[in-house]
Image (tube, rainbow, N blue to C red):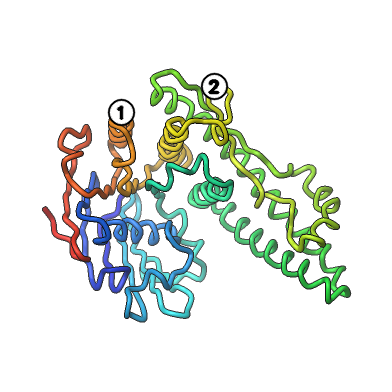
Amino acid sequence: MYISELKLDHFRNYDSLDLAFSPGTNLFYGENAQGKTNILEAVYFCGTTRSHRTSKDSEMIRFGAQEAHLRMEMKKTNVDYRIDIHLKEGKAKGIAVNQVPVRKAQDVIGLGHFVFFSPEDLGIIKDAPLRRRRFLDMELCQLDKVYVSSLAAYNKVLQQRNRLLKDLSFRPQDMDTLDVWDQQLVRYGSVLIRLREKFVETLSEIIRPIHLKLSGGREEIQTGYEKNTSVEDFADQVRKNREKDLVLKATSCGPHKDDLIFEVNGMDIRRFGSQGQQRSAALSLKLAEIGLVKETTGDLPVLLLDDVLSELDTGRQHYLLESIGGIQTFITCTGLEEYQNSPVHIDKVCHVQDGKVKEA
């Protein structure tokens, strides 16, 4: 699959933009704060209905405008897709696929597959568990429709249960309803745990040879799933934690507390690894995402590299670029000099300045 066209109206710093892309490597260069990242964000947003930068859709509407519109054309082997997203202040986003409105944003997820890599992602190994859970959720949502619906249901149940725990101090008559939320929490949470277990097992197999090659054969990486509870113990744990939850007024047990383990040569690099080891692991993780998509769907994802090469040393730069052959790639950078001796062929080059894009 590849993205053939993108149209933006009043999105971020773009008043209007109409771009055609190469199925190969597309490079956007220019000074900082000119709009390069906004193009990648728009592609990712159309493909996943989520921004990698904000949870507030209104922040993506151009300053001074009341609404924004995005349109993306995506070509696949058997079918083409046109995805339209309409953003309006104070309203939920409107989405259409091939000009037919869709009721839920999750209906768009999985039509295409996208891997986004930014300098912030280099910290995914050492950052708080929330970052790694978000990685799990975003990848599984693109690969498994059951996970999408189960995650949405689990998050809704978790929110309702937490609200009830807060309300029970002045509405004790509602205590019986806690049993209902407990059952739903275990029902949907168990689906997430099972699918995460399978995903991490596959991830571990794919990332190992990637990291071994990246480290010159010096480092063996292992990934693991650090569960807050197992499927078998989930219901009992929720019951045992009830008194604790009533005091905390929050749910203390469930997959919303999970984490990913990364070990290099038996050492937990989340806590004890050097910055170099953590960065190499993050790069291996992103490259493993490509393999995961290919193995799971038989298709290749679109790769979005947002000024990430400037954060990598020469060896890691070349390894990354040598690994992306045959994949539609979008790259942003401040200058072209770092690509003069690049192992990857650049098919389309555009200069971005003050919300204007000009093909070079």
From the viewer's perspective, tell me whether residue 59 is left or right of residue 25: right
Front residue of 122 and 320: 122
Kindly indicate the quadrant of the structure image that contains residue 169.
bottom right
Q: Residue 7 at x, y = what percent? A: 26, 66
From the viewer's perspective, tell me whether residue 61 is left or right of residue 223: left
Query: Which residue is located at x 33 percent, y 36 percent?
Result: 312
Label for residue 265?
A: 2
Q: CA distance from mark 1 to mark 2?
A: 21 Å
Instruction: Judge the density around disc 1: few (<14), some (14-19), many (≥20) Cα neighbours within 10 Å.
Output: few
Name the outermost residue toward the top.
Answer: 217
Query: Which residue is located at x 41 percent, y 78 percent?
Result: 88
Query: Which residue is located at x 24 percent, y 61 percent?
Result: 34
Q: Residue 281 at x, y = what percent? A: 46, 33
Looking at numbered disc 1 in the image, what kind of residue is underneath it? Gly
Question: To which residue does mark 1 refer?
Answer: 315
Looking at numbered disc 2 in the image, what kind of residue is underneath it? Asn
